[in-house]
Image (cartoon, rainbow, N blue to C red):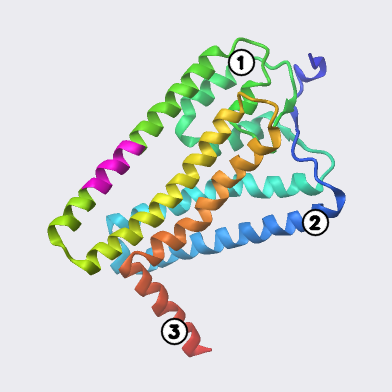
């Protein structure tokens, strides 16, 4: 038991064991990923806000998606970059809880079950703060946390898969009834790209949850969680913007104006 951590407000983050010659290349790679993420999502947000023709319910949902991606990754990536180049990976308990909350805004009840626990350790066995990393700081019985977490995951997965199946079935029925080749092609392209994105999110998210129960693969768990945040956040603006006709036209018009002015 780490006695000095019982009352200490500071936690240590395990992070990655990175060879010295890879520290700065990895840092700048994460910086490039973060800049691309912020630029693309902020661009979509500003375009939708500034164009009255885009201020419709569907595009408001795109805004919500971009805000979520920006929030989750702004909490995660800059802190991760700091820990890559820092030898002292420390974070306050309150900051750690805030990071976990922003990463898991849909499991706030589960996080509430975690912060009630007393702490007997100070090492976050991860490269970031998440709910599982926080409740592993406790020596109390966390059976309720595990049961609720797995139950919520199953329910979330079932609801997600159910809604996707129903949506795709409706699209398939429309395509079958219309028998329009162009319509079928567009529907196939849209569904395929969305399905790939969802499978990436599902696979990395599910792998993270499972690997928390198998401590022998810590680095794989850390990488899968980072990919869960980073890949969708970079692909969402591309997939949803470029495959939505009105939004795509506005983006192309904006670039054409800039090229003409230049």
The crowd level at tag 3 (other Cα within 10 Å; few <14, some 14-19, many 20+) is: few
Inspect the magenta stretch and tell me whether residue 48 lies in it: no
Quadrant in which the N terminus appears: top right
> What is the C-alpha distance between the residues marked 1 and 3?
57 Å
Residue 112 point in image, percent of width and height: 52, 23
The crowd level at tag 1 (other Cα within 10 Å; few <14, some 14-19, many 20+) is: some
- Residue sitting at x 17%, y 56%: 176
Provide the residue designation for mark 1.
Answer: 117
| Dot 2: element | helix
Range of residues picked out in magenta: 161-169
Residue 154 point in image, percent of width and height: 42, 27
Residue 31 point in image, percent of width and height: 68, 58
Provide the residue designation for mark 3.
Answer: 257
Q: Is residue 260 visible?
A: yes
Does label 2 or label 3 sit earlier along the sequence? 2
> What is the C-alpha distance between the residues marked 2 and 3?
37 Å
Provide the residue designation for mark 2.
Answer: 24
| Dot 3: element | helix
Q: Are the residues at dot 1 and dot 3 in contact (C-beta closer than 8 Å)?
A: no
- Residue sitting at x 29%, y 65%: 185
- Residue sitting at x 45%, y 56%: 236
Vertical position of residue 246 compared to residue 122: above or below? below
């Amino acid at each position: 038991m780490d006695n000095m951590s019982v009352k200490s407000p500071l936690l240590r983050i395990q992070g990655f064991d990175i060879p010295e010659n890879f520290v700065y290349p990895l840092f700048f790679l994460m910086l490039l990923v973060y800049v691309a993420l912020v630029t693309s999502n902020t661009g979509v947000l500003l375009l939708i806000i500034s164009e009255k023709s885009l201020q419709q319910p569907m595009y408001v949902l795109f805004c919500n998606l971009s805000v979520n991606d920006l929030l989750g990754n702004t909490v995660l990536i800059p802190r991760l970059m700091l820990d890559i180049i820092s030898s002292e990976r420390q974070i306050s308990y309150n900051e750690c809880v805030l990071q976990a909350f922003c990463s898991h805004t849909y499991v706030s009840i589960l996080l509430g079950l975690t912060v009630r626990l007393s702490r007997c350790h100070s090492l976050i066995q991860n490269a970031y703060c998440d709910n599982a990393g926080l409740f592993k700081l406790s020596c109390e019985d966390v059976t309720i946390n595990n049961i609720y977490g797995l139950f919520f995951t199953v329910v979330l997965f079932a609801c997600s898969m159910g809604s996707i199946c129903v949506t795709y079935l409706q699209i398939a029925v429309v395509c079958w009834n219309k028998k329009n080749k162009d319509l079928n092609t567009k529907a196939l392209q849209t569904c395929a790209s969305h399905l790939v994105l969802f499978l990436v999110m599902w696979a990395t998210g599910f792998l993270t949850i499972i690997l928390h129960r198998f401590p022998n693969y810590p680095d794989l768990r850390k990488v899968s969680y980072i990919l869960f945040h980073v890949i969708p956040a970079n692909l969402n603006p591309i997939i949803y913007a470029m495959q939505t006709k009105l939004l795509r036209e506005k983006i192309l018009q904006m670039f054409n104006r800039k090229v003409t002015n230049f």
